[in-house]
Image (cartoon, coloured by chain):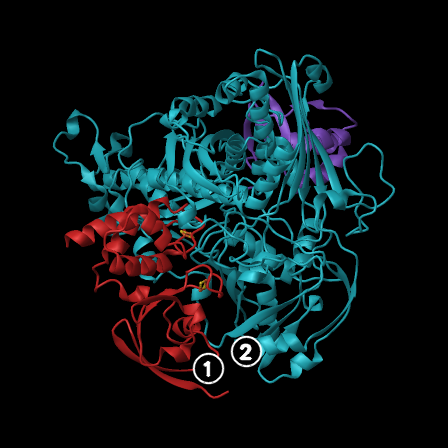
Chain colours: A purple, B red, C cyan
Amino acid sequence: MVEVTLWGSLGAVAGGKSKVEIEAKDIRELFRKLAEQYPGFEPYIDRGIAVAIDGVIYRDTWSKELPQGAEIFLLPRLAGG
Amino acid sequence: MAGVAVSTTINGDNVEYLCQPDETLLDVLRDRLGLTGAKEGCGTGDCGACSIILDDRLVCSCLVLGAEAEGRRIETVEGMAHGDTLHPLQQKFLEHAALQCGICTPGFLIAAKDLLAKNPDPTEEEIRFGLAGNLCRCTGYDKIVRAVQDAANVMKGA
Amino acid sequence: MNFDPRFSGRNFTSVGTRPIRPDGVDKVTGRARYGADFNMAGQLVGRVLRSPHAHATIRKIDTSKAEKLPGVKAVITSTDLPDLTDGDSAMYDILDNCMARKKALYDGHAVAAVAAVDARTARQALKLIEVDYEVLPHVTDVDEAMKHSAPVLNDTIFTEGVEEKPTKPSNVTKRTQYGHGDVHEGFGQADFIVERSFKTEQTHQGYIEPHACVASVSSDGTADLWVCTQGHFVYRQHCAQLLGMEASKLRVTSSEIGGGFGGKTHVWAEPVALALSRKAGRPVKLVMARDEVFRASGPTSATSIDVRIGARKDGTITAAEATLRYSCGPYAGMWAELGAMTAFACYKLDNVKTVGYEVLVNRPKTAAYRAPSAPMAAFAVESAVDELAKEIGMDPVEFRIRNAAQEGTRSSYGPVYGPIGIGPTLEAAKNHPHMKAPLGKNQGRGMACGFWFNFGGQTCTDLNIGMDGSVSLAVGTVDVGGSRASLSLVAAEELGIAYEQVKAVVADTSSLGYNDMTDGSRGTFSSSMATISAARNAIKILRERAAQMWDIPVDDVVWEKGHAIAKGEKYGNLAALSLKEIAAASGKTGGPIAGHSELVADGAGVSFATHICDIEVDPETGATRVLRYTVVQDAGKAVHPTYVEGQYQGGAAQGIGWALNEEYIYGKDGRLQNPGFLDYRIPVCSDLPMIDTQILEIPNPNHPYGVRGVGETSIVPPLAAIANAVSNAAGVRMTHIPMSPPRILAAIEAERGG
Ligand code: FES
Ligand code: FES
């Protein structure tokens, strides 16, 4: 079980929660389960969600494992110059 | 529109071409003669990417008509190296990494060559004002100025 | 594939040296080919007709006269680029921006295009196209656009992210919020509070090379596109989607690129060139003129920002709050959101709250510009931080050190930081001789910090070893500032051979797997990771081949310093085999030797910088002079230090231009008044001093060599550092960027008068 913190507008989709608990071993599973539990997530996942694991931002590594006890934070996918 | 026949010298070679009366020398060099070293950054004389030397004068070739080159001498970046020996400015630009994207580089090399021809021992300020007609967006000019200083030293010693 | 990206301390042989770049000679001799330097046989000249109105309904476009002009081979309007975006709103915006559909949304918006045998005919043809516009009221100012009375650009947009569901359409597309703690409570604990409002004007990336491409669509449905871009694979996807082509049938070759800085991450004219070529049945070359670049491509946001920061007497910040309004042009973006995330990222805060508003205006579509959105937010925050330090009576560097984020700090955008470099850059700045140098009359010193995320991304790399032992490295990330040199160094390092033995090229979309854009400072970070992985794969094969040549088990062969070595006493008489020797024998040991790598390079690591500058202000005219400038930034590991310095200097110079001169000026008619380098003045050589750099190397734990991205952060602190210096020199707080002479003079006079 990992605890996932959501950013503002994503929290609204999860019924106003800012944290959710999910049983997931990697980012792929996390997204899949989030979409199952909260159908409103899907468009956000399509647009791109970045995952910060202990402060390090992952934009695309869906195979990245979610270590137990790690701080997991969802952020909108960001653009650069 | 009838073309104008022009006979001129480019980097020491005699060259003849036909161009339209309203065609810029930059367009003639790039589109008719395949000399794409001079670049068009603005077409209005503001960026210096199209710099060439015309009869010992530094000009923006986007502001010169192709027809005006009749009987004159043109130097472009393609003529700076001798065979496979680079001009000291070219060599120093490489050594100092005075280019990032490099689009401004031909213009800077020509402008610097003209500057050193007129002032072989310029101060930093003279270099900065001498090259103020050339825009570079990548480097902040620091390494360009150093490359020109270094090349000036080499050329003085030669 | 098992690739371990973690940092492992090592001594470097090639990495950290400063050799000449592989593409250098072509660039100093004029041989390098940029976007406009390429031609195809039989090509036509493309030109775009642009709206002269800031906001207008397009009632009708009559192209019949233009089509009849001899020499015109194709005329297109939005009907030639039908909407195939299938509900993808971001792609639809790109399409509408390439060619206006129902409405022209800004001065310069493309409405039609022609392809003709020469430029003169194309120009004439544009004049013969008749567009019937119904001119609508417009709005170009970000604050004006938020008012209820403002003309609405898009009546299908209702503000997202607000509690009460809006009933009326609005120019505010979205509200976002970041932060933690309770700012109300935090301000209650403050002894000092500074509250200020700031504005910044819109600027352009200002790359010297205008957008240019040559497109050729064949009747069999295949196509070629030559283009200057920061990401040819992304351009391929976008163009294929907009034109209804299969991506694999469109080959995109990235030319040498004459600057991008984020502005060449979007397609603008490329789909138009392809549509023209498809209709004309001939190749089409489309090159933007400079005024088109300013009017219709990539500017950054104009902003209006309110900041409030409170601190105790001892210098601890107790609460920080900001409201950020960013212009997006006519299409929704996430620019204010990026500002809201980055604004307070340098600090350790218990109570912080930022709110961003994305605002539509009748200006060109905002594009990323180097650390997009961060410089404006940093300007507002760092100005207020300086003022607060002054009120408390603390040195501004000490004040920042006291409040700087550290490992374990919860960042203002959410996650907790790992090891970060803000503290070390501040300490280095504090101890820098620049800080102690004396100042003269009318001179002021300023400093500021900056933050940027940095990204990695999808990356694919091929490393081929020739029979002669030379190594060719094919990468898919466009080289915007010397990355081919850096990647060659990395390949040489990993293989243990000389830099000169490696030649890196940027491969086209048909030769290599997908690569993300070179954006987010990722070029060297991610492609170096892929290069290391490819080299390690090649080494595996080299060891196998050596084992074959010796006829021993491969497990007994190790790779050291460019040689295969047979390990163990029993092989005492086997001389090491060099890469060259193994390559020469490769025909008989199993054929060509290559290493391939495809990976997602993530974990780029956030980056911090601190800048110091001295400015002289002429109190009579408001004119400024930059006397001295110093950049301190963390690079993780500088692969080619000269190019790292170049990134620091270039970012600082762009920031200086933004702070002092550059701005889009719109007239009452909504038209851009200064679409040229004469009136949109970027810094020239005589405007700047030498720019000192100090590279810190705090290894990134998520890269084998410790590399971090370095390209973007350097543009974040300058606006604020210069504003602080000017404010100190002029004795009045500057709150509006650019600080052009009239603005400085007005501020000085207001201060004197008041
Ligand atoms: S192209 Fe001639 S000065 Fe810019
Ligand atoms: S190196 Fe890019 S403009 Fe000068």
Question: Residue B151 or C700: which is nearer the viewer?
Answer: B151
Q: Residue furthest right?
A: C167
Q: Is mark 1 within 8 Å of ligand 1?
A: no
Q: Position of residue C744 (x, y in %)?
A: 57, 40
In the rendered structure, which amino acid carries the disc numbered 2? Arg
Question: From where the camera sits, is residue C153 visible?
Answer: yes
Which residue is denoted by mark 1 in the rendering? B20
Q: Quadrant of residue C541?
A: top left
Is the residue under label 2 in contact with that under label 1 (CB below 8 Å)?
yes
Report which residue position mark 2 lands on. C120
Q: Which quadrant, please, contains the C terminus of chain B?
A: bottom left
- How packed mark 2 is, by other alpha carbons closer than 10 Å (few <14, some 14-19, many 20 or more), is few
> Ligand 1: which quarter?
bottom left
Q: Could you say where residue C406 lies in the image, as x and y percent from the top left?
A: 51, 19
- Residue visible at 51% across and 63% down? C213
What element does badge 1 sit on?
A: loop
Q: Foreground residue, B31 or B111?
A: B111
Left or right, C189 with respect to C424, comes to right
In this picture, residue C112 sits left or right of residue B1: right
Q: Farthest residue toward the bottom?
A: B2
Query: In this rendering, does residue C453 appear at all?
Result: no
Q: Amino acid at mark 1?
A: Gln
When the figure is inspected, residue C603 is found, relative to residue C185, above or below; the finding is below
When asked about the image quadrant of residue C130, the answer is: bottom right
